[in-house]
Image (cartoon, rainbow, N blue to C red):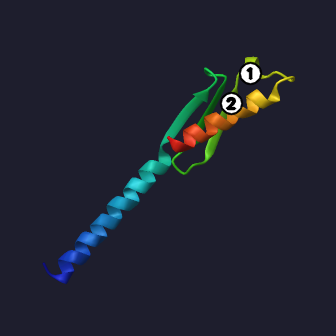
Amino acid sequence: MNINNMMKQAQQMQAKMASLQNELAEREVEFSAGGGAVVVKVNGKQELLSIKISKDAVDPNDVETLETLVFTAVNSAMKE
């Protein structure tokens, strides 16, 4: 195999990688916690797109539970 063929293959591989990265960046993942009490959506760039919180999850006397649900949902979505 000569150097020109190797260079051509490397360029093709770079183009495929760039295409896959763009594809992944456009993907969106939704994850919920607490049986749907908190729902978050992230994209492949690991950007948080939205958070939806059920009114039932909002209890002024128990903010820690809501914080935990949001934290869990966001982290799970990022891992996905």
Based on the displayed image, in which of its 4 quarters is residue 5 positioned?
bottom left
Q: Amino acid at mark 2?
A: Leu
- Residue placed most toward the observer, 62 or 57: 62
Residue at horizontal 56 percent and vertical 43 percent from the top = 78
Q: Is residue 17 above or below residue 57?
A: below
- Dot 1 crowding, Cα within 10 Å, few <14, some 14–19, many 20+: some
* Closer to the camera in the image, 63 or 19: 63
Q: Where in the figure is residue 53, as x and y percent of width and height?
A: 71, 26
- Residue pictured at 52% horizontal, 43% vertical: 79
Q: Secondary structure at mark 1?
A: helix
Q: List x then y, in percent, for residue 51.
A: 67, 34
The quarter holding residue 31 reads: top right
Residue sitting farthest toward the top: 56
Q: CA distance from mark 2 to mark 1?
A: 9 Å
Look at mark 2 in the image and give the residue it sits on.
Answer: 69
> Which residue of the protein is positioned furthest toward the bottom in this rendering?
3
Please say if 77 is above or below 56: below
Q: Are marks 2 and 1 in contact (CB under 8 Å)?
A: yes
Q: Secondary structure at mark 2?
A: helix
Q: Residue at x 28, y 66 (%)?
A: 12
Of the image marks 2 and 1, the number of the one nearer the N terminus = 1
- Residue 6 in percent (x, y) is at 21, 76
Q: Please, is residue 76 above or below residue 4 in the view?
A: above
Few, some or many C-alpha atoms within 10 Å of disc 2 (few <14, some 14-19, many ≥20)? many
Q: Position of residue 29 (x, y in %)?
A: 52, 37
Q: Disc 1 designates what residue? A: 57
Q: Nearer the viewer, residue 24 or 59?
A: 59
Q: Amino acid at mark 1?
A: Ala
